[in-house]
Image: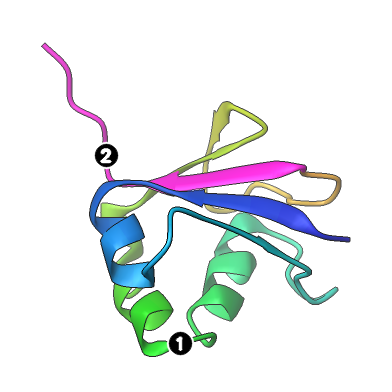
Amino acid sequence: MAVRLLYFAWVREAVGTGEETLDPPAEAVTLGQLIDWLSTLSLGHAAAFADRGRLRAAIDQQFVAMDAPVAGAQEIAIFPPVTGG
């Protein structure tokens, strides 16, 4: 099942696009496993996802942890930590 992936800030710069729609393999059950798979797609993807400690994510506009399930997700956003003031 295809999922819309959104990338922001330096993640977008490393991947080379702000958005892509992909059909992840069935083995990508959690967000962390999806990121592992995404890392294999290109050198840019590998660079963007090399340090998971520097990543945050939202599934269908809800912040989630790396062990969150991705089944049924329509949109997954991946971005650096957000700071505010």
Amino acid type of the residue tagged 1 in the rendering: Ser
Is residue 76 shown left or right of residue 39?
Answer: right
Q: Position of residue 31 (x, y in %)?
A: 61, 57
Question: How much space separates mark 2 and mark 1, taking CA atoms?
Answer: 23 Å
| Residue for point 74% across, 54% down | 3
Q: Tell me, for residue 42, which label it has, or none.
A: 1
Front residue of 69/18: it is 18
For the record, the magenta segment spans 74-85
Taking the spot 32% from the left edge, 58% from the top edge, the residue there is 11
Query: Which of the 4 image quarters holds residue 83?
Result: top left
Between label 2 and label 1, give the one nearer the viewer.
1
Q: Could you say which is closer to the camera, residue 56 or residue 68?
A: 56
Q: Quadrant of residue 85?
A: top left
Q: Is residue 77 above or below residue 3?
A: above
Residue occupying the far left of the picture: 85
Earlier-in-chain disc, 2 versus 1: 1
